[in-house]
Structure formats: C-alpha cells, structure tokens
Image (cartoon, coloured by chain):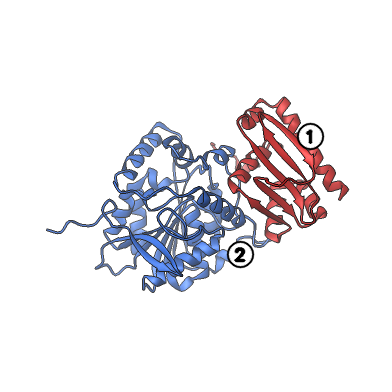
Chain colours: A red, B blue
Amino acid sequence: MLKFKFLLWAFAQMLKRQVKKNPDFARYIQAKRLVFQIRTASGSGRYFVIEEGAIRSHAGLTANPQFTLCFKDAGAGFATLSAKDSQAAFLQSLASKDLTISGDFREVMWFQGLTAFLQPPKVIQPYNRTAF
Amino acid sequence: MITPITHITAPTRFLEVDGVQLAYRRWGNTDSSQPPLLFLQHFRGGMDHWDPLMTDGLAEDREVILYNGRGISSSGGQPRTRIEDMADDAAAFVRALGLKQVDVLGFSLGGFQALDMTWRHPALVRKLMLLGTGPRGGDPDMESRVLSTAVNPVPTFDDFLYLFFGRSAQAEQAARAFWDRRHLRADQDPPSSPEVANAQIEANMLYLPRLSEDDPFAYLRGIHQPTFILNGVNDVMIPTINSFYMARNLPNAQLFIYPDAGHAAQFQYPQRFLQHVRQFLKE
C-alpha cells in the first residue's frame, strides 16, 4: 500500500516538473481544467487538479472527479503504473479487470496525451524505419 | 420517368430492433445476385459521413445499407460502450431487415464492429471489407495529436484533413473534394451527442487489450470470409501496420495500401477504391 501511495505522489511530482521544464507540456495543460483520481477499490488513492496552467495533487479521494482509474488493489496499481512498458501494462490491466475506468472518457483520452510527455523517446527498430 | 434514389435522396427510415428505433437508408440495384452491402461508420460518424461517390458507385451493382447504431445520431437508445455489443446490434439489425446474408464494409471503429460481427456471426457475412482499421490487441500507437483533435466538439475540415488524409497538396485537394461531396445532402442527420464520443472511446479502449499475449491474432485465423483490407501508407489514428497484421492472419484476406494517404484512403482515392472493391465483390 505504501509503495502505491508513494508512486502516486511521485507521479504528481513528475507532472509538476514537466510544467516547469517542458514548454510543450505547459502549453498542453494551459487552458485545461480537470480533476481526476487514481485509487484502489478499497478507497486508498490520490486526486489531481489541473487548473490555470498548474497541477496540484492531494492524498485521498474527491467527490466529483471527471474520471477515476480504480485498481483492484495497491499491488495491481503499483505493478501497472511502474511497469517498464506502461502502455502494454495498462491495457493488460484493463483486460484482466485489475483496472477499471469510469467517468468521462474524452478526458481519459486527453490524459493519455498528457502521460505521453512522460514516456522516454521510442526506439525505432531498423526494420520499422519509414519515410514518416 | 422515375428518378433513381441516391445517397442524396435516399429517405431515412427506422426499424425497431430490441425496442430501439434504428435509423437507416437503403437503396441501389435490387436485381443484383449479390447480397446488400452494410456500411459501419467511424468514431462519432453517421450516415452522412460516407462519400456519395463510394456509396452510389457501389449501389450500381447491389443494394447498399447505411445505418446508425444504437444512440448514434438519429438512432434511438443509449450508445454502446463495447465493440462486441455494437457488432451484435448490427447483426440483429440485419436479421430484423429479413436478410440472411450481407457483405459488410467497416471503416475505423466501424471496422472493429465489422470484424467482430463476422467473427461472432459468421453465417451472416459473405464478404468483409476493413478500411483504416485494426484487430483486437493491435498496435495502439496513434499520433499524440490525434488524442486532442479527434474529440473536438465540432470537427472541422482541418481536423478531418489531419486525421484522414495524406500530407501533400494533392491529398489536401482530394480532402476538399471529399468534404464538398459529403455535404451535398441537404437533410443531414444531427451530429452525434457527446455521450456517443464518450461511449465509443471506452469501447475503443476495451478493444485494445490482446486476447492472448503469446498469439494475439490467433482469433483472426478462424475468420474465412474473403476480406478486403485497405489503409493509407501512414495512418495516424490506427497505425497502418495493423492492416498488415490482419492480412497475415485472416486466411482469405488481400491487402491494399494507397500512397500519400492516411486513415481514410478510400475517401482520398474514391475512383481507385471503387474499381478495387467492385472487382473484389464480384470475384
């Protein structure tokens, strides 16, 4: 449980660091107002507020998030969010129902764009190089 | 003299399926030996998002049926949040029309439905056409700009240009010609609601996990219908490589990749597409 909570806190710090050092990221959130939360089924979690070009986060849950990522338990949450290939882990967790998503999926899609800023640059294998 | 019914004039009709009024338009050559062709549309799209050149061209040799699924545009009911439910709805709609078998053409999210419909209701589908689409568990890597563009409340021409077409001046010209054709019909359906976008994003997300980690496309090998797969060489929404994955696993598939094109290669090269697909349907 502690590792999961720490991971959520660290995630918030990563987002805040991006606001400061990455102008594209700052532009991406500039006009956005979004409240979302990441939690376990048992009620442990953290919520995030994006507003006026800044990101704040708080331990605990909020009453009216625009979307919620809910993990079966802290172990599943930690494993998914800390996986090396985070996109594959995210999809696997959805398939196994270790993760359920509720709320406004348009905002979830926007959030996917946000997390793309945190990914390391993709390594393109020689056979996959294209003109594009 | 009787004026032929076309994409522009075909009346919107309604059919009750499982207590829900589903909107559709049906016209074309009723003397054909070929079964009617059912069209399944892209994310948020409805009957007015098809290209009249494509629908009328194909209607010369068979009947064509455009259809809005549950909750989409002029259809009643709540929008579905799972592709398999959308596919089952399409199958129920075909049966409610009294048809034993159809050909199915699905574009993008409609391609997901067409593939699932063929997989889940094999006796209902004679031939399958998959345009700008992908299999369950395919490569999910869309360009990040898609994430903010595809959900714009009112999609603009520039959104469609980026999402659907190639990058050259010729591609843009083809996009403008498509845009003009698409707006020829005066009594257009209302746009789909924000709830449709929400439901279809959820459905899209739940379509992405692999059915099997070791052999994700094994399920395709049991689909034996002749299949026509088309994509542009650089699809920013559903990566083009997914078309190759489908071609390599669907036992009776043939793959077409059009140059300087993206997600909607059929709208960029409507005449080329018509020739290719007419041959496929009559083979």
Quarter of the image with the N terminus of chain B is bottom left
- The residue lying toward the viewer, choosing from B116 and B245, is B116
Q: Which mark is residue A13?
A: 1
Q: Which residue is mark 2?
A: B218
Residue at horizontal 76 percent and vertical 50 percent from the top: A39
Identify the image quadrant of the C terminus of chain B: bottom left
Q: Residues within 10 Å of mark 2 (few under 14, many from 20)?
A: few
Task: Residue A12 in the image: state x and y as whole percent.
Answer: 77, 37
Q: Amino acid at mark 2?
A: Ala
Q: Is residue B88 left or right of residue A86?
A: left
Vertical relation: B278 (above or below) A34: below
Could you say where residue B187 lies in the image, as x and y percent from the top left?
30, 49
Q: Secondary structure at mark 1?
A: helix
Q: Residue at x 38, y 46 (%)?
A: B267
Horizontal and vertical percent for residue A122?
Answer: 67, 39
Q: Residue at 36% across / 40% down in the picture?
A: B179
Q: Is residue B168 left or right of residue B244?
A: left
Q: Residue furthest left?
A: B1
Label 1: how many residues lie within 10 Å, few (<14), some (14-19) or many (20+)?
A: some
Q: Badge 2 sits on which subunit?
A: B
Dot 2: element: helix
